[in-house]
């Protein structure tokens, strides 16, 4: 990387030296990725009331305030740190907006609140996109529904890992840091989650 296109580590060093322009550049660089994360996890029951852009903006504003302290002594990679700030805001939003709704939610909906129906649909599309002929719409629609049903049968932790890997596009290292696990364990959990998904698809009549 050159100074014209500094990488994250270079920007963090400049932030630690008090360069606020570097802080703004760093956060702006990760805004699209953070918005994708918020959009993926925003529950459909509150999506009409909450704009993902507002959540991202609030998270970035908080990150800007905390960035000098982080840059001076980073404990984890930058994006997992930034993502955690946005995640905490999502948790508070869901607790606030779904507090009353929790009493009416059916018990069989035993999935993590953070994984929206749209996200499950996107995962289904992701897993069948290369398996069927794009021209055979009926078959593709049936496959999407089968994958969706299979995903519903997975444990929330398995679905969440697949979301992080295939929808958020986090690296193995970033997932490991986010979940405070080793990269080897993340690779193993991913393999097992995909194996369980495959078995669920195989058992679908």
Image: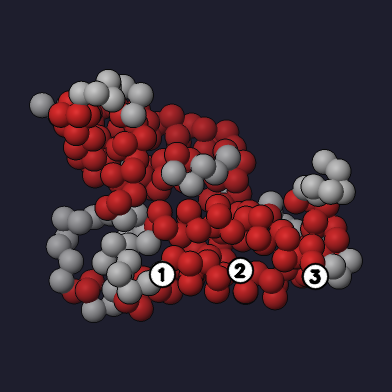
3D distance between C-alphas at marks 1 and 3:
27 Å
Left or right: where 184 falls relative to 12? left
Q: Residue at x 24, y 55 (%)?
A: 110
Left or right: where 92 falls relative to 204? right
Of mark 3 and mark 2, the one earlier in the sequence is 3
User: Can residue 198 be seen at all in this image of the molecule?
Assistant: yes
State the count of labels: 3
Residue placed under numbered mark 3 in the picture: 20
Residue placed under numbered mark 2 in the picture: 60
Is label 1 in contact with label 2 (beta carbons under 8 Å)?
Answer: no
As displayed, is residue 140 above or below residue 161? above
Q: Nearer the viewer, mark 1 or mark 2?
A: 1
Of mark 1 and mark 2, the one earlier in the sequence is 1
Please give the label number shown on residue 51.
1
The picture places residue 133, in percent across and down from the top left corner, at: 27, 20
Q: Choose between 148 and 54: the one closer to the eye.
A: 54
């Amino acid at each position: 990387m050159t100074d014209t296109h500094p990488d994250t580590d270079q920007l963090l060093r400049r932030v630690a030296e008090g360069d606020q322009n570097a802080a703004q550049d760093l956060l702006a660089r990760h805004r699209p990725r953070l918005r994708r994360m918020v959009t993926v996890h925003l529950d459909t029951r509150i999506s009409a009331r909450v704009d993902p852009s507002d959540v991202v903006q609030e998270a970035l504003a908080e990150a800007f305030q905390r960035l000098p302290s982080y840059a001076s002594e980073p404990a984890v990679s930058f994006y997992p740190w930034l993502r955690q700030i946005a995640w905490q805001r999502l948790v508070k939003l869901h607790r606030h907006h779904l507090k009353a709704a929790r009493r009416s939610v059916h018990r069989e909906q035993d999935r993590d609140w953070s994984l929206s129906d749209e996200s499950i649909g996107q995962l289904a599309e992701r897993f069948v996109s290369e398996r069927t002929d794009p021209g055979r719409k009926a078959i593709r629609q049936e496959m999407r529904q089968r994958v969706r049903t299979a995903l519903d049968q997975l444990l929330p932790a398995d679905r969440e890992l697949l979301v992080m890997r295939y929808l958020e596009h986090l690296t193995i290292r970033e997932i490991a840091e986010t979940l405070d696990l080793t990269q080897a364990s993340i690779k193993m959990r991913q393999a097992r989650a995909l194996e369980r998904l495959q078995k669920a698809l195989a058992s679908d009549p």
